[in-house]
Image (cartoon, rainbow, N blue to C red):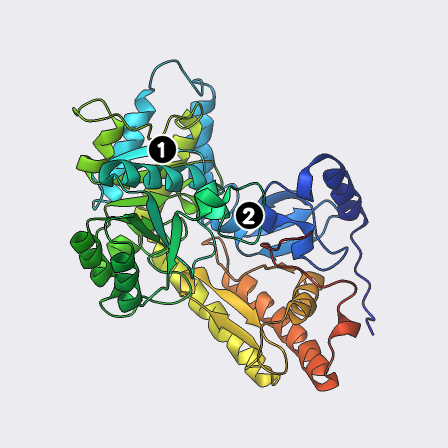
Amino acid sequence: MESEEFHLPRSRAANERLHALVPGGAHTYAKGDDQYPENLAPVISHGRGAHVWDVDGNRYVEYGSGLRSVSLGHAHPRVTEAVRRELDRGGNFVRPSIVEVEAAERFLATVPTAEMVKFAKNGSDVTTAAVRLARAVTGRPRVAMCADHPFFSVDDWFIGTTPMSAGVPESTTELTVAFPYGDLAATEELLTRYQDEVACLILEPATHTEPPPGYLAGLRELADRHGCVLVFDEMITGLRWSEAGAQGLYGVVPDLSTFGKALGNGCAVSALAGRRELMERGGLRHSGDRVFLLSTTHGAETHSLAAAMAVLTTYVEEGVTARLHALGERLAAGVREAADALGVGDHVVVRGRASNLVFATLDGSGQPSQQYRTLFLRRLLMGGVLAPSFVVSSALSDADIDHTVDVVAQACAVYRKALDAGDPTPWLGGRPVKPVFRRLA
């Protein structure tokens, strides 16, 4: 059925080497080759701007770079220069570097809804620190998390709730309860059922849908009334929604919030931010029980904090968030137009805020389909588009987006053929892609 030849022999060999040495063949499950069509999982050589090159020499327009972390494009000059300045000055000392206070000042000036900040290396550490702090200040054991958001932490309190719960004691998982996004009545019912037991409500303030009118303010009021801590996970929304994240855009102030991803443009940096009264419980200027909030050897590595400062400055001075939205709107309009023109507008569906677009691939009966996703990803790769999502970076040009839309149109033509045949199998080139969270390999 396939006439085009598209092979990645060097990537295939590199994937074999990876699987022999690294469990899962990648350091993030979402980057695994099981997420890509069989034998079409490129291994990256390098990237610049919105483009990456694989070890076979193919160039791609890349979306969702670094799992949404590289929002300014690869090797961004301002970030690279800031990092380079620190490299010759030493990266880690026995006492705080002056860069730590400068980065904290810059962060809190950009996210004025927070009063204190502590930096770390990844999102899981700071979300778990928020949970521990909430439990400490409330004296309550349970965590209420939003059931509609896919990921909060690698730690037991969250992973125990997923299909990959092997190794997590049931007694830990029982302490995590879930509430649906956008439903204040259901959340209030949960808080009433577990009266005085819930330490915090933790959620992404927005992801693929806008919050219903009054929803976030309603959660704020519920948390206050029931005496629990409101935590916003701003890993994705931070910088992409506004420089101050979703809390800055929607004007609802959480007690604690967590940032990462876009904050470092690919450098390892995350942040726990929040109200002084809570955050200081992890400090030295209070008389209560000490909370082991965050204590990481590499959390204040100088070049990553310099990268974060450069990112924050670039966003503010260059209006990056507005550019991300403009690029995303152009892309979404083009993809929808192409899908409609080829008769698959009800099957290839673009969703989400313009700065954070994802796509759904639906089968003939309108159900999400891993097989049709495989077909779609395969045709994108063959056209030089690496797109597990349509999350844009500010390095994309209009020409990049026009090329992407052309390739999407070619993919939609094949998609239509598969729908007409009632079976996408001949167009898959092997086994279908798989969901990240599944019990068996």
Q: How many dots with numbers?
A: 2
Query: Would residue 243 be seen by someone viewing this image from the given angle?
Result: no
First in sequence: mark 2 or mark 1?
Answer: 1
What is the crowding at mark 1: few (fewer than 14 residues within 10 Å), some, or many (at least 20)?
many
Mark 2 vs mark 1, foreground winner is: 2
Real-space Cα separation, disc 2 to disc 1, in angstroms: 28 Å
What is the crowding at mark 2: few (fewer than 14 residues within 10 Å), some, or many (at least 20)?
some
Say above or below: 30 vs 216: above
Q: Residue at x 28, y 32 (%)?
A: 104
Residue topped by disc 1:
119
Quick check: 424 left or right of 344?
right
Say above or below: 345 vs 182: below
Quick check: 45 left or right of 99?
right
Query: Would residue 6 be seen by someone viewing this image from the given angle?
Result: yes
| Kind of element beneath mark 2 | loop
Location of residue 167 in the rendering, given as x and y in whole percent from the top left corner: 57, 40
| Viewer-closest of 178 and 45 | 178
Q: Looking at numbered disc 2 in the image, what kind of residue is underneath it?
A: Ser
Residue 138 tag number = none
| Viewer-closest of 425 and 293 | 293
Location of residue 135 in the rendering, given as x and y in whole percent from the top left corner: 29, 39
Residue topped by disc 2:
165
Location of residue 277 in the rendering, given as x and y in whole percent from the top left corner: 17, 36
Q: Residue at x 41, y 28 (%)?
A: 299
Location of residue 432 in the rendering, given as x and y in whole percent from the top left corner: 71, 64
- Quick one: quadrant of the N terminus? bottom right
Q: Looking at numbered disc 1 in the image, what kind of residue is underneath it?
A: Phe
| Kind of element beneath mark 1 | strand
| Viewer-closest of 138 and 131 | 138
